[in-house]
Amino acid sequence: MENIYNNLLQSISKGEKLLAVLIDPDKMKPEGLSDFVVKIHKSVSTHIFVGGSTVEESATSKLVSEIKKHTKLPIVLFPGDVSQLTGQADALLFLSLISGRNPEYLIGKHVASVSKLRQMQLEVIPTGYMLIENGKETAVQKVTDTKPMSINHIPEIVDTAKAGELLGMKLIYLEAGSGALHPISSDIIRKVKHELSVPLIVGGGIRTKKQLELTYQSGADLVVIGTAFEEDEVFFEELNKLK
């Protein structure tokens, strides 16, 4: 698999709806993976993201190796820490938490990862990662010791996203967080997308086909789902029918 980012741009230029299923190595064990990937293949999913806020050492590498036995979909790392890096994947979202001000997650973790990345053939995609409040504390908030951006401060959210692009980020990722009480609003997505010339990823709190379609309509180029896909059989069937 080569040039995941360029393929993503080409798909977006064609008006394609891109959907990534996020697999958390702490929640998905290799022995249960085969059936889950079959469900992914039956859906309209285009990418598989792998990562979590807290993951045991080597768990990511083992899981990605197992996933590759069952699919040819692009496997993209969505890491919560340097320990989750593995050359088994196709690409890496090089996440900078631009919504927070913790230097470790703005640049510190990135510096620490370079010695590992030198030994890997991963396609590295600089990504501005923004945590948006959703009504509950998320694992990302706890681990990074940062606060999500207020949904009442939309101009600040928009300016932060644009600043990420101007800094050279190739993707902007709006995240409500795993288990979010509600997805990111259409108003926020629409206003952020209007300012950007790079692709917009949106994830967190999306549990229905209606919410998914609204997220696309609001301007998301790629949507990420996790918990809902794992736990809701009805949502599986809705994704199979999505056009």
Image (spheres, rainbow, N blue to C red):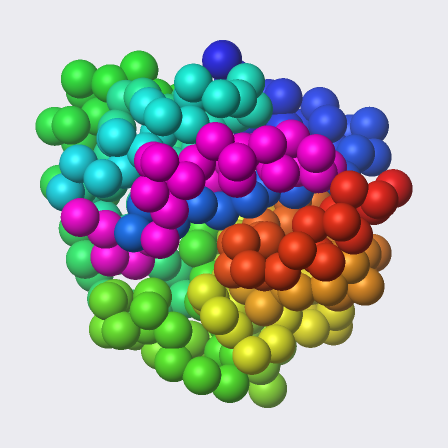
| In magenta stretch: residue 65 | no
The x, y position of residue 194, in whole percent, is 74, 56
Q: Nearer the viewer, residue 9 or 122?
A: 122
Asked if the magenta segment contains residue 42, the reply would be yes
Q: Would you identify the image quadrant in which residue 185 lies?
A: bottom right
Q: Position of residue 155 (x, y in %)?
A: 61, 75
Q: Residue at x 47, y 40 (%)?
A: 49
* Residue 131 image-quadrant placement: bottom left
> What count of labels does the image hold?
0
Q: Is residue 193 visible?
A: no
Q: Residue at x 37, y 46 (%)?
A: 28
Determine which quarter of the picture holds residue 47.
Answer: top right
Q: Is residue 150 above or below residue 112?
A: below
Indicate the position of residue 150 as horizontal and vertical percent values. Answer: 51, 82
The answer to whether residue 94 is above or below residue 34 is below
Q: Is residue 43 above or below residue 135?
A: above
In the picture, measured across the screen, residue 162 lies left or right of residue 66, that is: right
Who's the residue at 70% across and 56% down the image?
235
Residues 89 and 8: in front is 89
Image quadrant occupied by the C terminus: top right
186 vs 235, nearest the viewer: 235
Q: Is residue 42 above or below residue 236?
A: above
Q: Magenta residues?
A: 27-56
Q: Could you say which is closer to the camera, residue 204 or residue 107?
A: 204
Residue 24 point in image, percent of width and height: 38, 49
Residue at 72% from the left image edge and 58% from the top image edge: 234
- Is residue 92 visible to the viewer in this orientation of the structure? yes
